[in-house]
Amino acid sequence: MLLTLFYMVSTWVQSWRLSSLKARLIGAINYGPDFRKPSIMFYTKPSEFLKDDTVVNIQTNNENGTSENLLTSSLCSNKNSAKLKDLIWSQGDKRLCTIYPQQQVDISEWLSYPIGKTFFPLCLDNCNQINVSESSTIHVLIEADIENFTPSAFAKAMKLEDYGFILSWMADKYFAAIMKTDVDHLSKLSIALMQGQCFINNGLILTRIESVEIIGKPCKYIFNDPSVLPGKKLIGKSQWEAHLQTLKTFSNFAKNAFQEEKPVEIDNLPGVIIISDKLTVDSPMFEMSCATDKDDDKQIEDHFPVPSTPPPTPASIELKDKSTPELIQHLGSSVLKSTTFNDELNTSATESINNSITAPPPIDSVSIITSANNEIVSKNFKINSKNVITNRASKFSSEKKQTSNYEEITKPPNILIYADSTVASDNIQRVLKQTLNKEKYIIYTLTPEDARRDVWKDQTHLIVVCGNVDNEVATQLIDYLVAGGKLLALCSDTLHTILPSFKTAEVREHELVRFSYGRWKNVRMMHHIFCYQASPVKSRFSQDNEDGKIVTRPTPVSANVKDKQGKNHTFQIKVLGAEETWNTPSIVLADLPSSSGKAIFSQIHLEADPSQYELEEAKFNALKESNSARLEILSDLLGTHLKLDVKPEPLMETVYTPGFFLGRHELKLNMLDRLKSKMKSNNIFKTSKIELQFCNNDTKLMKASKSLLPILLYQCPENFSTVEYFENLQTKEIGRLVVYTDIITSTMDVVAGCELYHGLVVISRQQTSASGRNKNVWLSPKGCVTFSLQIHIPLNTYIGQHLSIIQHIAATSIVLAIRGIPGYEDIDLNIKWPNDIYVGNEIKIGGLIVTSLMESQKAICNIGIGINLSNSIPTSCINDIIIKHNEKNGTKLETIGYEKYLALLFNAFESIFIAMQNEDLSYFYQFYYNYWLHTDTEVSVTLTDGITKEAKILGINSLGFLEVQEKDGNILTVQPDGNSFDILKGLIVPSLTR
């Protein structure tokens, strides 16, 4: 009886508390003039952070020592204006209060929560089984502690799906989600929290719930293989740590997808793609039922209609002579004259980067993209398997494109690091950057998966191996050496696997030894855990109590090595350095004269920084004394034996320079008037990447940095000839306004995520942080022409309905600016689909990237271009081609100056752009097909069902996608969508992981 009475009283109290709290919440929500809603916030914090039970200024210091406002979430965009209105309830370390103004959360960089029962990101049945009242709908921000996982809390955790419908999520310092609920369910959730039920799904501790207004739409993630994500509950802390890392990885890539406005594939989770909402509407790249609903598909069709009439192909179009009066009329009279280029030829390189504007392929398409390293990968994301095209020789339609005009084939300047630990990888990357010419080489890490494939071999100048490798990777390394590659192996068992004659290994764990190499004598350094040698003198290893000095068997002068085909190759062996005590080989050179392949094997830790041994005083002091010798030895090995450009320079801080606003005064005023309403104090305008300060004579000039570019309105730069540029510029809009600077992070930062002015060009002599797709690096040294062009395109025009053709217009303009000059028609400058610029068919010297932003009824397109104009090393450049053309043909064509080339390029771009907008398509195609490398190229396509078919390249369609025809007449459409494709070799293979 007493229990029944107690139950009745408890039920009544619970009902009273719920109704009372619900009434107060309703009153709070409708509080204020014009019924402006405040935010309702429940917060719990360990008691040591709260000094009393009042809520006057709820702040504490976070782990970084900065002030943290506990009144509202740090995720709120208007958190700095948050003020306390009412304290509804307080007990110990918990608070329930109202905040005004209503807090806002921008979820554009968040991720959509999957519908249905899931185990990722939380174990949750998100099928909307509760009924949420539409009349009192509230969006609630939920934050939970992710560092203190409690597996046993699963049983006593309250389920979020019992209180609302989860819409989106993110993970950083804590797990956060947006839940759609109503006042009734929010009241129940608050009561549960008051009663101490703070564990939620996955055993997480809930720290905050807060009603918010949401802004933007979250990113979507798609995948074909469900096994890549957790499919069961987590049962231990080790599982949770891995799960937590995955959550943070997803969130980081969502930020990248939104900020870069292009789909991104998650590292180590192949096939998992994140697409921002902006991209799925503004720049659709995929056709996937799991990524878009019917409304999205309709928007894609509206923006990118597929024409009923196919565009011309090389076979169907009559290629015109580039010196015709028709071309002269389009490009302007400036092409009739040329000036001498007197700048010094500097050593450098540029890496081409790729377009992010694409449209959905037809149903039977094979999807590909050209990467910065000249490979092609095929992944059709509507299916689980990958398309692979086998290696076949390309066939070209003319003799001119079958052979090269150059004696040497220059490999891309890529150095790959394959290491069995992150520490080793970071060490060798750091020391290579200290040792090599920083403007000549690009350093990447190579994953085990990529190392087992063939795609990296032709794209690599040197591979550095740290630690052990398996037999499959060792076989790939042998084939790379046999083909003329260069290898540096540091404390790796590759010495044993590649050179089998070194079949003896003595354990020398953590041993500090003395060794000599060249002029460096008795250098003290750490030895590899194993000591590989040809064979021991005795049948057993050396012992500490043995008398006398052990003399090892002489190292063999040659070694026979078999490649994957079983063919023998004889390497010449030479010991370059030896350990002093036992005279065992410390540094060994293996040379293959037949192909110039070279490998250096070091059994000394040349990559290890002395700081690794700070806790071992004796070793640390010895290694510190030998550190300069270590760097000198490594530099000598790279320069003397591996023939790399060694150019150690002191690390100097980058000095960024101000920009200069160039163009007609009225055009400058027009642009500034448009931006005036968006400027902050001190004439600062913020793009999504950098702040721009427009400085007149009265403005206080700020210092240029990687985050700020001051732009001088009424001054001219010393390193850019405005006379040369504007005298050659014949356009009406393109290039008429210029922002020029000597050194900047990236010209694309200036135009990122904002509408500035149609035809505006941002030009820089050097860029410090230019990058390409998939973490590829874009070198931007002196002599390289680098700029970004912003164009505004109405969506109801021809190009507006075929936005992905822009990259092809830009690529054609890069070549036409040279080959459109009378006398320069036969300069061997060509286009590799979709957006690379080549000398002949072997040497890449430039490329481009395009990003887009939709504003009302127009597209804002930013085109970033890099082209080698006067930098000869490491590949080639336009002026080198002109000089070699003169030598071969006895002509006296002048090299092209920096400013003139820019003007000619913009002339060419505007002429093609206007013709395309007027639907004069043949004008574009006659140049494009005359300059591209792929007429009648044959490839072998392995379809998703495993069947391999022969196909021939026909041309591009109206969207710029590649069309290939099978022998049975069936036509496949190939789209650039994030894969890597070496079209010159007729192969489609998986791209390198960056």
Image (cartoon, grey):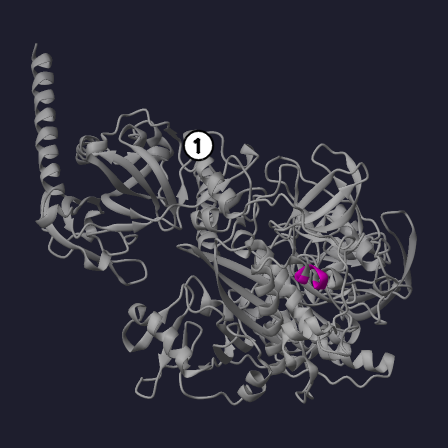
In front of the other: 472 or 361: 361
In front of the other: 351 or 934: 934
Q: Is residue 653 above or below residue 806?
A: below
Residue 423 appears anywhere in the view: no
Instruction: Give the number of callouts.
Output: 1
Q: Is residue 480 left or right of residue 860?
A: right
Q: Residue at x 76, y 68 (%)?
A: 581
Q: Is residue 628 left or right of residue 713?
A: right
Coordinates of residue 326 in the picture (x, y in percent): 69, 71
Coordinates of residue 124 in the picture (x, y in percent): 38, 30
In front of the other: 403 or 331: 331
Coordinates of residue 279 in the picture (x, y in percent): 47, 50
Q: Is residue 661 left or right of residue 951?
A: left
Q: Amino acid at mark 1?
A: Phe
Q: Is residue 223 magenta?
A: no
Q: Which quadrant of the rendered structure holds the C terminus?
A: bottom right
Q: Write the start and end of the magenta stretch as one range.
A: 923-927
Coordinates of residue 298 in the picture (x, y in percent): 48, 39
* Residue 880 quadrant: bottom right
Q: Is residue 516 above or below residue 366?
A: below
Q: Secondary structure at mark 1?
A: loop
> Which residue was labeled with disc 1?
119
Query: Badge 1, how many Cα within 10 Å: few under 14, some, many 20+?
Result: some
Q: Main secondary structure of the magenta part?
A: helix
